[in-house]
Protein backbone atom coordinates (compact mmCIF):
# COMPACT_ATOMS: atom_id res chain seq x y z
CA UNK A 1 0.00 0.00 0.00
CA UNK A 2 1.08 3.59 0.56
CA UNK A 3 3.52 2.60 3.31
CA UNK A 4 5.77 0.61 0.95
CA UNK A 5 7.71 3.61 -0.50
CA UNK A 6 8.40 4.81 3.05
CA UNK A 7 9.74 1.41 4.14
CA UNK A 8 11.92 1.17 1.04
CA UNK A 9 13.31 4.67 1.71
CA UNK A 10 14.26 3.75 5.27
CA UNK A 11 15.94 0.54 4.05
CA UNK A 12 17.84 2.45 1.38
CA UNK A 13 19.10 4.99 3.90
CA UNK A 14 20.29 2.20 6.19
CA UNK A 15 22.30 0.61 3.37
CA UNK A 16 23.81 3.95 2.41
CA UNK A 17 24.82 4.58 6.03
CA UNK A 18 26.76 1.31 6.13
CA UNK A 19 28.57 2.25 2.89
CA UNK A 20 29.24 5.64 4.42
CA UNK A 21 31.07 4.09 7.37
CA UNK A 22 33.48 2.26 5.06
CA UNK A 23 34.16 5.41 3.04
CA UNK A 24 34.99 7.36 6.19
CA UNK A 25 37.44 4.67 7.31
CA UNK A 26 39.19 4.90 3.92
CA UNK A 27 39.45 8.66 4.26
CA UNK A 28 40.96 8.23 7.71
CA UNK A 29 43.74 6.12 6.23
CA UNK A 30 44.35 8.82 3.60
CA UNK A 31 44.38 11.48 6.28
CA UNK A 32 46.72 9.49 8.51
CA UNK A 33 49.15 9.13 5.63
CA UNK A 34 49.07 12.71 4.32
CA UNK A 35 48.31 14.64 7.49
CA UNK A 36 44.82 15.86 6.59
CA UNK A 37 41.92 14.81 4.34
CA UNK A 38 42.14 16.22 0.83
CA UNK A 39 39.29 17.92 -0.99
CA UNK A 40 38.95 14.95 -3.30
CA UNK A 41 38.82 12.53 -0.38
CA UNK A 42 36.20 14.56 1.43
CA UNK A 43 34.17 14.93 -1.74
CA UNK A 44 34.27 11.18 -2.27
CA UNK A 45 32.97 10.55 1.22
CA UNK A 46 30.26 13.17 0.82
CA UNK A 47 28.73 11.13 -2.00
CA UNK A 48 27.14 8.97 0.72
CA UNK A 49 24.16 9.78 2.95
CA UNK A 50 24.00 10.19 6.70
CA UNK A 51 21.29 8.27 8.47
CA UNK A 52 19.43 11.31 9.89
CA UNK A 53 19.35 15.09 10.01
CA UNK A 54 19.70 14.91 13.81
CA UNK A 55 23.07 13.17 13.35
CA UNK A 56 24.22 15.97 11.07
CA UNK A 57 23.31 18.59 13.65
CA UNK A 58 24.91 16.64 16.50
CA UNK A 59 28.23 16.33 14.65
CA UNK A 60 28.16 19.98 13.63
CA UNK A 61 27.35 21.28 17.10
CA UNK A 62 29.92 19.02 18.77
CA UNK A 63 32.85 20.44 16.75
CA UNK A 64 34.53 21.97 19.87
CA UNK A 65 35.06 18.43 21.14
CA UNK A 66 37.24 17.55 18.16
CA UNK A 67 34.63 16.28 15.73
CA UNK A 68 35.82 18.34 12.80
CA UNK A 69 37.76 15.87 10.68
CA UNK A 70 35.35 16.12 7.72
CA UNK A 71 33.70 19.57 7.92
CA UNK A 72 33.18 19.67 4.14
CA UNK A 73 31.10 16.52 4.39
CA UNK A 74 28.66 18.27 6.71
CA UNK A 75 28.28 21.29 4.44
CA UNK A 76 27.78 19.10 1.39
CA UNK A 77 25.10 17.13 3.15
CA UNK A 78 23.08 20.17 4.25
CA UNK A 79 21.97 20.85 0.68
CA UNK A 80 21.10 17.20 0.17
CA UNK A 81 19.22 17.02 3.51
CA UNK A 82 17.09 20.05 2.59
CA UNK A 83 16.29 18.47 -0.78
CA UNK A 84 15.34 15.19 0.89
CA UNK A 85 13.05 16.95 3.36
CA UNK A 86 11.31 18.77 0.52
CA UNK A 87 10.74 15.52 -1.36
CA UNK A 88 9.50 13.83 1.81
CA UNK A 89 7.03 16.64 2.54
CA UNK A 90 5.72 16.50 -1.02
CA UNK A 91 5.28 12.73 -0.84
CA UNK A 92 3.52 12.95 2.54
CA UNK A 93 1.09 15.53 1.16
CA UNK A 94 0.34 13.31 -1.83
CA UNK A 95 -0.32 10.32 0.42
CA UNK A 96 -2.58 12.38 2.69
CA UNK A 97 -4.61 13.64 -0.24
CA UNK A 98 -5.07 10.08 -1.45
CA UNK A 99 -6.36 9.04 1.97
CA UNK A 100 -3.70 6.31 2.30
CA UNK A 101 -2.19 5.18 5.62
CA UNK A 102 1.16 6.80 6.42
CA UNK A 103 4.29 5.73 8.30
CA UNK A 104 6.94 8.02 9.73
CA UNK A 105 10.09 8.04 7.63
CA UNK A 106 12.19 9.46 10.46
CA UNK A 107 15.08 7.03 10.69
CA UNK A 108 15.99 8.23 14.18
CA UNK A 109 18.39 5.74 15.69
CA UNK A 110 20.20 6.97 18.81
CA UNK A 111 22.60 4.02 18.76
CA UNK A 112 23.66 4.74 15.16
CA UNK A 113 24.06 8.41 15.99
CA UNK A 114 26.38 7.61 18.91
CA UNK A 115 28.34 5.17 16.76
CA UNK A 116 28.85 7.85 14.09
CA UNK A 117 30.00 10.37 16.69
CA UNK A 118 32.46 7.86 18.16
CA UNK A 119 33.66 6.93 14.67
CA UNK A 120 34.41 10.56 13.92
CA UNK A 121 36.26 10.90 17.24
CA UNK A 122 38.33 7.80 16.49
CA UNK A 123 39.28 9.07 13.04
CA UNK A 124 40.34 12.42 14.50
CA UNK A 125 42.58 10.50 16.92
CA UNK A 126 44.11 8.53 14.04
CA UNK A 127 45.07 11.79 12.33
CA UNK A 128 46.06 13.95 15.30
CA UNK A 129 47.48 11.77 18.08
CA UNK A 130 51.23 11.63 18.67
CA UNK A 131 50.90 8.22 20.32
CA UNK A 132 51.38 5.16 18.15
CA UNK A 133 49.22 3.10 20.50
CA UNK A 134 46.40 5.66 20.57
CA UNK A 135 46.39 5.82 16.77
CA UNK A 136 46.39 2.05 16.42
CA UNK A 137 43.63 1.52 18.95
CA UNK A 138 41.51 4.29 17.40
CA UNK A 139 41.93 2.82 13.92
CA UNK A 140 40.93 -0.63 15.17
CA UNK A 141 37.80 0.74 16.83
CA UNK A 142 36.92 2.81 13.76
CA UNK A 143 37.33 -0.23 11.53
CA UNK A 144 35.10 -2.24 13.87
CA UNK A 145 32.37 0.39 13.79
CA UNK A 146 32.67 0.61 10.01
CA UNK A 147 32.23 -3.16 9.81
CA UNK A 148 28.97 -2.90 11.76
CA UNK A 149 30.15 -3.92 15.24
CA UNK A 150 28.40 -2.37 18.22
CA UNK A 151 30.06 0.24 20.43
CA UNK A 152 30.03 -2.21 23.34
CA UNK A 153 32.17 -4.60 21.32
CA UNK A 154 34.76 -2.14 20.02
CA UNK A 155 35.13 -0.51 23.45
CA UNK A 156 36.11 -3.71 25.21
CA UNK A 157 39.63 -3.45 26.73
CA UNK A 158 41.14 -6.18 24.57
CA UNK A 159 39.45 -5.30 21.27
CA UNK A 160 42.48 -3.56 19.74
CA UNK A 161 45.11 -5.80 21.31
CA UNK A 162 47.78 -7.29 19.05
CA UNK A 163 50.39 -10.04 19.25
CA UNK A 164 54.00 -9.58 18.15
CA UNK A 165 56.00 -12.61 17.00
CA UNK A 166 59.65 -13.27 17.91
CA UNK A 167 61.79 -16.14 16.66
CA UNK A 168 64.12 -17.97 19.00
CA UNK A 169 67.17 -18.52 16.85
CA UNK A 170 67.69 -17.09 13.37
CA UNK A 171 66.91 -19.13 10.26
CA UNK A 172 70.67 -19.54 9.67
CA UNK A 173 71.14 -20.98 13.18
CA UNK A 174 72.56 -17.83 14.77
CA UNK A 175 71.84 -17.57 18.49
CA UNK A 176 69.69 -14.43 18.49
CA UNK A 177 66.12 -13.29 19.00
CA UNK A 178 64.55 -12.17 15.73
CA UNK A 179 63.81 -9.34 16.12
CA UNK A 180 65.82 -8.63 19.24
CA UNK A 181 64.05 -5.32 19.96
CA UNK A 182 60.27 -4.87 19.82
CA UNK A 183 57.70 -2.29 20.93
CA UNK A 184 54.12 -3.09 21.84
CA UNK A 185 51.20 -1.36 23.56
CA UNK A 186 49.75 -2.13 26.97
CA UNK A 187 47.46 -5.13 26.69
CA UNK A 188 49.38 -6.61 23.76
CA UNK A 189 51.07 -10.00 23.83
CA UNK A 190 54.35 -11.41 22.56
CA UNK A 191 54.72 -14.95 21.22
CA UNK A 192 58.21 -16.43 21.11
CA UNK A 193 58.58 -19.37 18.72
CA UNK A 194 61.38 -21.91 18.95
CA UNK A 195 63.02 -21.68 15.51
CA UNK A 196 66.61 -22.94 15.27
CA UNK A 197 69.53 -24.03 17.45
CA UNK A 198 67.39 -24.87 20.48
CA UNK A 199 66.60 -25.51 23.17
CA UNK A 200 65.68 -21.96 24.14
CA UNK A 201 63.71 -20.11 26.75
CA UNK A 202 62.74 -16.57 27.70
CA UNK A 203 63.89 -15.23 31.06
CA UNK A 204 63.47 -11.60 32.09
CA UNK A 205 66.19 -9.74 33.92
CA UNK A 206 64.81 -8.93 37.38
CA UNK A 207 66.96 -5.79 37.44
CA UNK A 208 65.59 -4.51 34.12
CA UNK A 209 61.80 -4.73 34.34
CA UNK A 210 59.23 -2.14 35.53
CA UNK A 211 58.54 -1.71 39.21
CA UNK A 212 55.73 -3.93 40.41
CA UNK A 213 56.40 -6.65 37.84
CA UNK A 214 58.00 -9.87 39.08
CA UNK A 215 60.46 -11.91 37.06
CA UNK A 216 58.59 -15.14 37.82
CA UNK A 217 55.28 -13.85 36.50
CA UNK A 218 56.56 -13.16 32.99
CA UNK A 219 59.43 -15.62 32.47
CA UNK A 220 59.33 -19.21 31.23
CA UNK A 221 59.61 -22.06 33.69
CA UNK A 222 61.28 -24.55 31.38
CA UNK A 223 62.74 -24.88 27.90
CA UNK A 224 61.32 -25.04 24.37
CA UNK A 225 62.87 -28.09 22.76
CA UNK A 226 60.83 -28.71 19.63
CA UNK A 227 60.92 -26.42 16.61
CA UNK A 228 57.65 -24.55 16.39
CA UNK A 229 56.96 -24.69 20.13
CA UNK A 230 55.78 -21.36 21.52
CA UNK A 231 55.61 -19.26 24.65
CA UNK A 232 53.13 -16.34 24.84
CA UNK A 233 52.87 -13.63 27.48
CA UNK A 234 50.58 -10.60 27.77
CA UNK A 235 52.00 -7.32 29.09
CA UNK A 236 49.83 -4.82 30.97
CA UNK A 237 52.51 -2.65 32.59
CA UNK A 238 54.23 0.05 30.55
CA UNK A 239 58.00 0.31 30.63
CA UNK A 240 61.23 -1.26 29.41
CA UNK A 241 61.97 -4.96 29.75
CA UNK A 242 65.23 -6.82 29.15
CA UNK A 243 65.31 -10.57 28.68
CA UNK A 244 67.61 -13.36 27.56
CA UNK A 245 67.79 -17.03 26.62
CA UNK A 246 69.27 -18.75 29.66
CA UNK A 247 71.15 -21.55 27.82
CA UNK A 248 72.69 -19.06 25.37
CA UNK A 249 73.08 -15.88 27.41
CA UNK A 250 76.84 -16.24 27.26
CA UNK A 251 76.61 -16.20 23.44
CA UNK A 252 74.82 -12.87 23.58
CA UNK A 253 71.24 -14.04 23.05
CA UNK A 254 69.50 -11.03 24.57
CA UNK A 255 66.29 -9.19 23.78
CA UNK A 256 64.59 -5.90 24.64
CA UNK A 257 60.89 -5.13 24.92
CA UNK A 258 59.21 -1.73 25.28
CA UNK A 259 55.59 -1.54 26.39
CA UNK A 260 54.02 1.85 25.60
Image (tube, grey):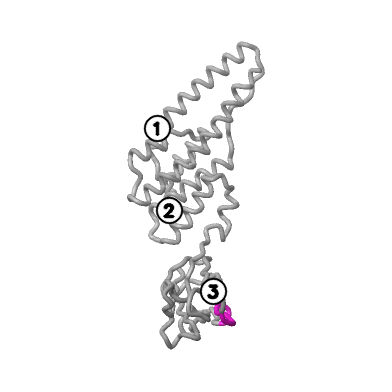
Q: Return the x and y of residue 45 as percentages of the image width and height.
A: 42, 38
Magenta stretch contains residue 66: no
Q: Quadrant of the C terminus?
A: bottom left
Q: Which disc number belongs to residue 76?
A: 1
Q: Is residue 53 left or right of residue 251?
A: right
Q: Main secondary structure of the magenta part?
A: loop
The x, y position of residue 19, in whole percent, is: 50, 38
Q: Nearer the viewer, residue 249 or 136?
A: 249
Secondary element at tag 3: loop
Question: Percent position (x, y) of residue 210?
Answer: 48, 78
Highlighted magenta segment, given as a residue range: 216-224
Q: Secondary structure at mark 1?
A: helix
State the residue position of label 3. Answer: 227
| Residue in view at x 55 percent, y 57 percent | 159
Q: Quadrant of the N terminus?
A: top right
Q: Which residue is mark 2?
A: 125
Say which element carries label 2. Answer: helix
Q: N-terminal of the two: label 1 or label 2?
A: 1
Report, in whole angstroms, how far the alpha carbon at label 1 lies from the one at label 3: 58 Å
**Position above or below: 198 against 42:** below
Amino acid sequence: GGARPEIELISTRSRLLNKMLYKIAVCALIAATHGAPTLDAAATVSDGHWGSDELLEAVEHDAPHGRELFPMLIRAHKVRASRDRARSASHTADVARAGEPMMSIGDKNPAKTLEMLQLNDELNTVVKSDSMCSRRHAMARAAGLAAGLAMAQVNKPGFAAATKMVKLGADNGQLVFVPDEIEICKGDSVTWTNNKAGPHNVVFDEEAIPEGVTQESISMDGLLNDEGATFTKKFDVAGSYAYYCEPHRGAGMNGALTVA
